[in-house]
Amino acid sequence: MQSLILASSSPYRREILDKLGLNYTHSSPDIDESAKPGESIPDLVKRLAEEKALAVAEQFPHGLIIGSDQAASLNNQILGKPSTSEKAFDQLKASSGQRITFYTGLAVFNADQQTMLSETIPFTVHFRTLTDEQIRAYIEKEQPLNCAGSFKCEGLGIALFSKLEGDDPNTLIGLPLIKLISFLEQNQFSVL
């Protein structure tokens, strides 16, 4: 079997991939993540996932390289990582009572065959209507400053939502395992 490489420095993506019990290496891709003029959010994350996989393939010319990228969208505007408590508060206040769609681009590049499988997988969260006190309490307890949209759904962030819509909850964290397993199997890489 080919070696498996995760083109990511994200500890969250590594935690998700660890669920499968596979041996893999991870390497951080160095790419420009800027959007192109007129590029939609779904197209952006798919392109970036592909570019991450290709960038890491230069180091691993015989592997299956997994690239992934994610963006959260509120009213067609990207919600980035807040970095500060003030920005996190503003994001969560704007999200209160709203629907946020997370778009996760997933790519698997087979370096031996020079083939790429890629797709954008959406996942929507419905926020409860939150008070300022609830938002501040959440930020203080969870410190979600390095998370797009200012929440960690794998922790206390689940208390912010009224409903989740999507095929794979791992998509929300940044690595859709159901689609990844399908892509790996199409490359004759068995998970079981």
Image (cartoon, rainbow, N blue to C red):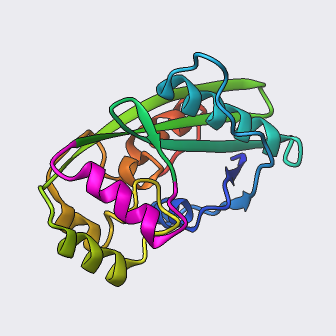
Q: Position of residue 177 (x, y in %)?
A: 42, 48
Q: Position of residue 54 (x, y in %)?
A: 77, 35
Magenta stretch encompasses residue 92: yes
Q: Residue at x 27, y 50 (%)?
A: 95
Between 27 and 179, the residue placed more toward the observer is: 27
Magenta stretch: dominant SS? helix
Q: Residue at x 49, y 50 (%)?
A: 191
Q: Is residue 41 placed above or below 156 in the rendered structure?
A: above
Residue lying furthest top? 38
Which segment did they paint magenta?
81-98
Q: Is residue 20 placed above or below 189 in the rendered structure?
A: below
Q: Position of residue 165 (x, y in %)?
A: 20, 41
Q: Position of residue 146 (x, y in %)?
A: 53, 65
Between 9 and 102, the residue placed more toward the observer is: 102
- Observer able to see residue 58: yes
Between 111 and 106, the residue placed more toward the observer is: 106
